[in-house]
Image (cartoon, rainbow, N blue to C red):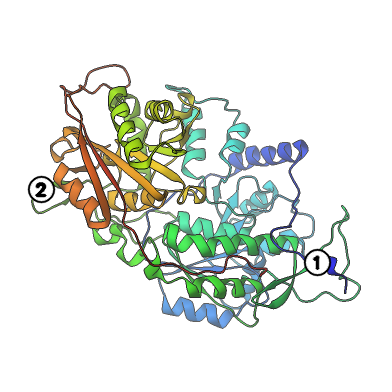
Amino acid sequence: MSSDNWISSDNLKTGSETLEDKKYLIDNIRENINLIDHWITQSYAHVSHAIIVSGGDSLDFDEIKQAKLKYPNSKIFCVKHSLKKLIENGIEPDMCVIVDNRNIKDKSSWGYNRDDLILVKGKIDTIFCILSRANPGYTKLLKENGNKILGFHIYIQEVLDALDIDYIPEKNNDMELKRRLSILTNSNITLQGSCAAMQCLNIAYFMGFRKMHLFGYDGNIKKPGPDQINKKDNDGNRIYFRTQCNNKIFWTCTEFLVMASEFENKFQTYPTTFGIKFYFYKGKNETLISNIYDSIIKNLSMNDSYFNFEQYSLSNNNYYKEFKNITEKKAKYFNKLIRSNNNDLVIKSFHDYNEYKQYQIESADKEIIISNRECIELISDHIEDILGEDIKYGICHGSYFGHEQKFFSEELDCEVLGTDICQNVNKFDNNTIIWDYHEIKGEWIKKFDFIYSNSLDHSYDPFFCLEQWMKCLNENGICILEWTSIHDVGAIKKQEPFKASLDRYKKIITEKYELIDIIKSPRSYPIYNSNGKKITKPLFRFFIIFKNKINERKTKIIQNMNN
């Protein structure tokens, strides 16, 4: 057999979108925004399990039923190719994810009529979660059929283009604009994936699930017949390939190999980065993805993780919610004020994530603190004393105007990124992104030489927040937190839910991290808001510098699926 039918994820070539494709997708988004009334919103992490069902031949429906019996509060997510199979076997999923942007009237990649895949006899309570760039034919057909629909986004810029928004005004009373922007900001899935099987996992994570049971994730196909092995598509590219994992050979196609490659990355990073625990079910057949799972997860002990879900601070401080109603997405919170015994720490709770986010956005123009240039110069000197002059990357969380990353960049001659949850920050500084600093991107892991923030008091869960940030430091990296008396418990505000004394900050840090130093500003400075108004009397500023403790344990994983 010719050697050119071998392929790996390294030499895989995928097509790029043309301008015509882009216009088609933006038209899809525009139409779906008008068709879809309800959009997915983010939830805090909780303890329920997600059963996620792809459409592979390995599916064992008895195994799915057993998992549901074992975890009765679990929710079942599926792709459209597994929807009918589940219902025919007496299993009604809670959610079916649709991302397909191709014409609903055409046949699917595997010869099915696309509209037949989602039309089910009788009434079902399954919610159809539709990607905004998907073909609107799915939305129309499901609405006509009386099905429940939720929408979601994955690319912010595409949605901005579809909404014809070139910039976000600082102040705008246009209620229609605000409505359209809320659709964008509250329902954007930041984790990426190339197919519905991946987006099922991402949506489950977005909805707060951290324990995920995977069924029907194969990544391979049966060996093609002699007349199919060398078959090519309309562009002359080979359709079927062989690949290898654990010295076992599997036949696959471009679509499945991309998915397998993505899972290889997720199995390696998601347990440690996002606290996800996978339960993988091989079902009837040994598969490519099951072999990737065996190669990685079985060698990755959760004891070696940065993050152990069972010790997740949200559950420990009675501040998490149990996901109760997937249709209405309304949860019961433990609306209690969290206060330490000696009154040196307070965390105020919110009804839900949207309430937290709304307080942050509404208070931005009034309450934003302007960073002090002299203090940044002082801290920069200490950063150089600790790290030397070879400093490449820094990140400032909750930076809004972007002054601190500008000052750090000039003082240290390095690249500094800023994040802020508010929606108009990137008009002030091109190096500031709209981002909830409780979440981290995969490319940030072990990247930054330093992290700086004066905004930890805006965190709904500072313990989890610090865990996330510290994953982003490289081996020698340091974190710097600014503390003043306005961070203390006597100054609590709804938009600043976390308040603690300087001693409590030190205790929180030394419990898990290595304290390097606490620097006090040489003189006191008043604090100004974004309008230049002095909002405090002169205050001394304290800068707490710390780093990760050295962990001698090494996690051995297989990183190359084509070894």
Where does label 1 land, which residue?
Answer: 240
- Give the quarter of the image for residue 318: bottom left
Q: Position of residue 99 (x, y in %)?
A: 64, 53
**Residue at the extreme left:** 342
Q: Position of residue 305 (x, y in %)?
A: 40, 64
- Looking at the image, which residue is at 88% across and 70% down? 2
The secondary element bearing badge 1 is classed as strand
Comparing 264 with 314, the one in front is 264
- Give the quarter of the image for residue 386: top left
Q: From what the image shows, is residue 446 above or below residue 258?
A: above
Name which residue type carries label 1.
Answer: Tyr
Question: Is residue 65 shown to the viewer in this render?
Answer: yes
Q: Residues within 10 Å of mark 1 (few under 14, many from 20)?
A: many
Comparing 66 with 150, the one in front is 66
- Looking at the image, which residue is at 73% across and 59% down? 114
Q: Position of residue 157 (x, y in %)?
A: 59, 36
Where does label 2 land, which residue?
Answer: 343
Name which residue type carries label 2.
Answer: Asn
Question: Is residue 125 shown to the viewer in this render?
Answer: no
- Give the quarter of the image for residue 79: bottom right
**Mark 2 vs mark 1, CA separation in Å:** 65 Å
Tell me if 160 is positioned left or right of 111 in this view.
left
Tell me if 136 is positioned left or right of 242 in this view.
left
**Residue at the extreme top:** 532
Q: Residues within 10 Å of mark 2 (few under 14, many from 20)?
A: few
Dot 2 or dot 1, earlier in sequence: 1
Q: From what the image shows, is residue 504 above or below residue 422?
A: below
- Looking at the image, which residue is at 69% across and 58% down? 10
Comparing 88 with 313, the one in front is 313
Comparing 271 with 390, the one in front is 390
Q: Quadrant of the N terminus?
A: bottom right
